[in-house]
Image (cartoon, rainbow, N blue to C red):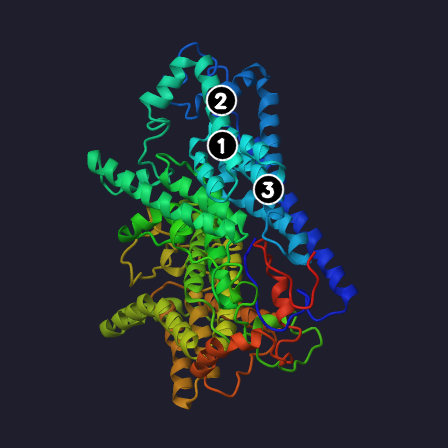
Amino acid sequence: MANVEHGGRPGDGFGAAAPGTAKTRLDVVRVGLWLVAAVLAVRQVAVVLSTPKGERLTDLETWVGPDGVLHVNGSLYDSTRFTGTPFSGLVLKPLTKAAEQALGWGWTFGTLLLVVALGLVAARALPQPVSRRTSLLAAPVAISLLMLSLPVRNALYLGQTSIIPVLLVLLGCFAVRGERASGVLIGLAAALQPTVLLFAPLLWFTGRRRAAGSTGLTFAACTALAWAAMPHDSYTYWVHHLAGVGLGRPADDLANQSLHGALLRLGVEGPLEIALFLALGAAVAVLGLRRAVRYARDGQLLLAVAVTGCVAVAVAPTTWQHQLLWVLLAMAGRVGRKAGDRYVWPVAVILVMTLPAKMMLPNMASLYPLRDNVVLIAALAAATAVPFLSRTSEYYRSPVPTRYADPVPTRWRRVPLLPFLGRVLTRPNLLLELLLIRVGYSAYQQVRLAATGGTNSGGRATAEHHGEQVHSIEKFFFIDIEHWVNHTVTNVRWLEDFFNFYYTSFHFVVPLSVLGVLYARRPADYRWARAALGFATLFALVGFWLYPLAPPRLMPGLGFIDTVHGVQDFSKPDYGTLTALTNQYAAMPSLHFGWSLWCGLVIAILAPRWWMKALGLLHPLFTVSAIVATGNHWVLDAVGGAAVVGAGFGLTYLLQGPRPRPLAEPAGKTEEAGEAGDTARAEGDGDTSRAEGAEGAEAAGEVSISGTGPAKGRTPS
């Protein structure tokens, strides 16, 4: 579903290959994507069914279980546990007669089928024309992303009905024939989720007035039917609770990603909060619906539906996490004139909809308002601010193309395996880079903790045993110098202060500085260096997972002095407050030394002056001295750090080939020229030698269901 398309020479999406070879590759990719979707579906079902009874399908149990609210003779809303409309309660009533185990299995597999149907409909709803590649790959990618999304995972785990209204709207807009039938389906969705009524204005102002009228009539009929069958419950829901306000969890709960919930979390209460909510909600509704109407008239009906859904997310009094699928559908829009910028919006949406908010932003009090409302912010952005391209824009199908360097000869015929990765000359989007760096570091922290079962005390015995192994190996090779260095440094006050400062200050500052300079001055080298650093860190995470290791300072009985953190209490499993923050047993390999070695090598390779190269190589020398002197690493940890860095550069070479050779003009001018003149190249420049074989392979890692038109010279499917 990633809405990305790179410019360059028009051609097949999988490289400059013969038609038969390209078709074979396309079929292989298609089968692989369907297998991924199947694996994700099986995994989600297995997670639900393997959860102990009483912890799974809790919302369904609350409704239709033996003690559920649908069994009682009183009001559905006496306990506020039931948050649906009276009509949804009327629809769910027959399920109370089903066997409990059969209902759980049937509900889980039924929800799974609804997700598959939703992905298929969304894939078929793309603005036409679409390329053959897009039409074949869109469905499995859409289903996979739906399976990974937090709303679907919550709906499956809790036993929610939130997927049904979204599917009914998509079926009404894209699957059925006739405006009346379309309106009936959308009206049914509104009877289950009242904010869906916002689709009636969208239908009306886009000329589908019969559908809009049918939507309103169906909603009114279903609501009247429920009122006749359950008058007390209907009065409680529509009048006493103002269409469900106050039902379920407290409105300021983090799961409530609406304007009402955000204002309450910001501390605004009482009449002021109500007035602000009504004013902001009205403004978002007017602006968002105007944008939706414009996109619908432009032929991007799926985007219009997604924008309207995002408006509903924002203006509803309560929008719980399982009701947020509309935001994921907003990926259908295209953003950015340059090909490289097409990554930013879809990747941001995927991260917001698949990862916890704590992984998106640092755990800083000043960022809590953003972190606690990150999905709402994405919905508001899609509804009111994101500049989606019109299909009439010259950049919609032909963005400013990515610029490629000439291929560099290699020693082996199979290198590079993915040549497009190492030949891009233009710098990547900064927002996307920062976002991915943050998510990558969060994953790094999570893996470090998971290596010891989430607690430091849980892995203490294993880590100390591995520490004894490493110490024995070093003594065998006569390189066990840590104790001597540690105590020698502590006897020289200024030297101890220097290494403490170096250890705590330069670990992040130097790598980020190197990346920043390369990003600004040498974009192609930035991509090469960043890839090597990423692979090295990934290999290190594997080491943390497989071999938790206690550093010298946390080895009882060896007499090391913790010069940075102070004296540790070895009688406590967690050694006090320090080790409660992160996994202290991620010593092998040493990323302190690994990252410093990466910095030294990159500077030595790229720096134009010999003294710059020398200064760069001093950094890993000082770092290895600091990690040993402070008692934070063994000598063999530094060897492991060097190994993962070597593996990172090696894998980069295998995938990308040698470092690309930039064009003759300086990097700054290259970028400016690319932005100013690449439009002309996108419209028919005959210079294809630079891009041949690269842009197609690059597209192999990208899939779009956003209505991408066919490449020039190809027939729309």
Residue type of the residue flagged with mark 3: Phe
First-in-chain label (2 vs 1)? 1
Residue 104 in the image: x percent, y percent?
Answer: 57, 25
Q: Residue 16: which quarter of the image? A: bottom right
Dot label at residue 213: 1
Q: Nearer the viewer, mark 3 or mark 1?
A: 1
Residue 238 appears in the figure = yes
* Residue placed most toward the observer, 415 or 524: 524
Residue 82 in the image: x percent, y percent?
Answer: 42, 23
Instruction: Find out whether the residues at labels 2 and 3 contact each other: C-beta distance under 8 Å.
Output: no
Indicate the secondary structure of the residue bearing disc 3: helix
- Label 2, label 1: how many angstroms apart (C-alpha)? 12 Å
Residue pictured at 54% horizontal, 77% vertical: 680
Residue type of the residue flagged with mark 2: Ala
Which residue is labeled 3 in the image?
174
Instruction: Find out whether the residues at labels 3 and 1 contact each other: C-beta distance under 8 Å.
Output: no
Image-based side of 590 in relation to 629, left or right: right
- Label 3, label 1: how many angstroms apart (C-alpha)? 18 Å
Q: Residue 397: which quarter of the image? A: bottom right
Which residue is labeled 2 in the image?
221
Where does the C terminus fall, quadrant-wise? bottom right
Vertical side of 110 occupied by 704: above or below: below
Q: Nearer the viewer, mark 2 or mark 1?
A: 1
* Residue placed most toward the observer, 191 or 160: 191
Residue type of the residue flagged with mark 1: Gly
